[in-house]
Amino acid sequence: MAFFGGLGTGGLQIKIRLTGTPETHPHDIFYLRHRPSWKVRKNVFTALKSHKISTAPTLAPQQQQKDGGGPQRIMVYSCNHDTEGEVTLQMPHGKKLDHMGIQVKFFGRIDMEAGAHEGRPHYDFISLSKELLPPGSLFDTRTIPFNFRGVEKIHESYHGRNVSVKYFVRVEVQRQWLPPITQEHEVLVQIPGVEPSVNEPIKMEVGIEDCLHIEFEYEKRCYHLHDVICGKINFLLVRIKIKHMELAVIRRETSGEGVALTAAMASAGGGTTGAKSDMQNIVTETQTLLKYEIMDGAPVKGELIPVRLYLRGIPADVTPTYHAENNRFAVRYFLNLVLVDEEDRRYFKQQEIILWRNELG
């Protein structure tokens, strides 16, 4: 995958190309249909169609343009894959550029939007640098290999509403008396995990005294991103005229300094005055990824409603659950069960689920 430097650089063009493809590294590199984002796609079936096309063995991958003149296929890399490639520095014929040294750098960075930080918009958890060329002059085309091997990538790439996690390669051409010429290329990273050792079913009884009493059960609490959520809802007492019932998947992004403390307070149900003041710096975005009706009409006592929800069919880029990463952000997922009566009053119950990645894609 390659990327060119821009204009206004004395004619210098910088091309960063990462080595490796899904064909050469089938377990470490995977083609993506689009760049991951926070947005929810309008067409529910796009998610299934996209996954089918991306993994179909009979389809040849789209050929990349040799000189970077066309759109590139987006590739995602395993956390265990070494970041390596080559940098091409190209000067127009007859021109020369004097420089004070050229470096290639590799960053792992958490970027936060305004309002979700206190004077520190980003935090680098990885910052490495290597020299490509000593001070001198450029007057032709030079291609120089680079590698960053054995780098531990502890976070997965994430592009959210107020926070993002990025890995990128940056080339810097230092100049005397002038700002450096820079070019960046993002490296998308995913971290395949293993199923949590403790994965008990979810069983809860909720209701309104003498009016409504329901029992819902989901087979487990932890799901991989292509899993199926199965469960059932049992009506033990119904004295309210229910019109219909909905099930939604909700994503909640929390960002800001002190996210871990906020999560602990939410679990405990309280906190100190100082802790509450820290919560004022926390920004929370809630997003409904999918909502569908699982019951239409009034239920009766003893009625059992089955639940089956395919996570792969959610028209959004679902990520693993993030637990207060670097105490700066968290991403959590919830199942929201909503009952609507004939007077359009809504009764709901949320239950958190844990998502994890079992494979690239």
Image (cartoon, grey):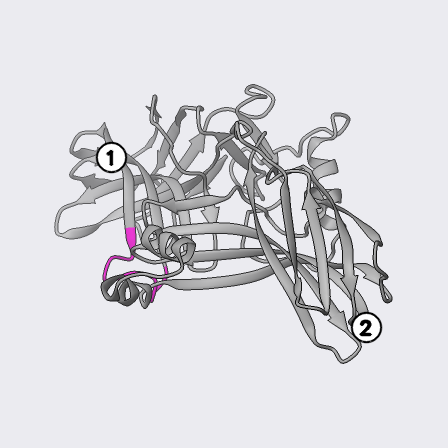
Q: Is residue 47 left or right of residue 160?
A: right
Q: Residue furthest left?
A: 177
Q: At label 1, which amino acid type do we have?
A: Gln
Q: Dot 1: what SS?
A: strand
Pointer 2 residue: 241
Cα–Cα span, label 2 and label 1? 69 Å
From this view, report whether residue 290 is shown above or below residue 136.
below
Q: Dot 2: what SS?
A: loop
Q: At label 2, which amino acid type do we have?
A: Lys
Residue 138 seen anywhere in this rendered image of the structure = no
Give the class, few, some or many, for how many residues have Cα within 10 Å of label 1's Cα (few <14, many ≥20).
some
Q: Quadrant of the rendered structure where residue 31 is?
A: top right
**Residue 240 in picture, x, y percent from top left:** 78, 72
Q: Which mark is residue 103?
A: 1
Q: Residue furthest bottom?
A: 343
Q: Quadrant of the rendered structure where residue 112 is?
A: bottom left
Foreground pick, 2 / 42: 42
From this view, report whether residue 86 is shown above or below residue 41.
above
User: Is residue 121 in the magenta section?
Assistant: yes
Foreground pick, 275 / 239: 239
Residue drawn 26% across and 41% down?
A: 172
Could you tell me what secondary structure mostly forms the magenta stretch? loop
**Residue 67 in picture, x, y percent from top left:** 51, 36
Foreground pick, 110 / 180: 110
Q: Is residue 82 left or right of residue 105?
A: right
Residue drawn 23% across and 62% down?
A: 119
Residue drawn 40% across and 38% down?
A: 155
Query: Which of the two discs, 2 and 1, labels the residue nearer the N terminus?
Result: 1
Q: Which residues are magenta?
A: 113-122
Tag 2 near tag 1, CB within 8 Å: no
Q: Is residue 107 left or right of residue 22?
A: left
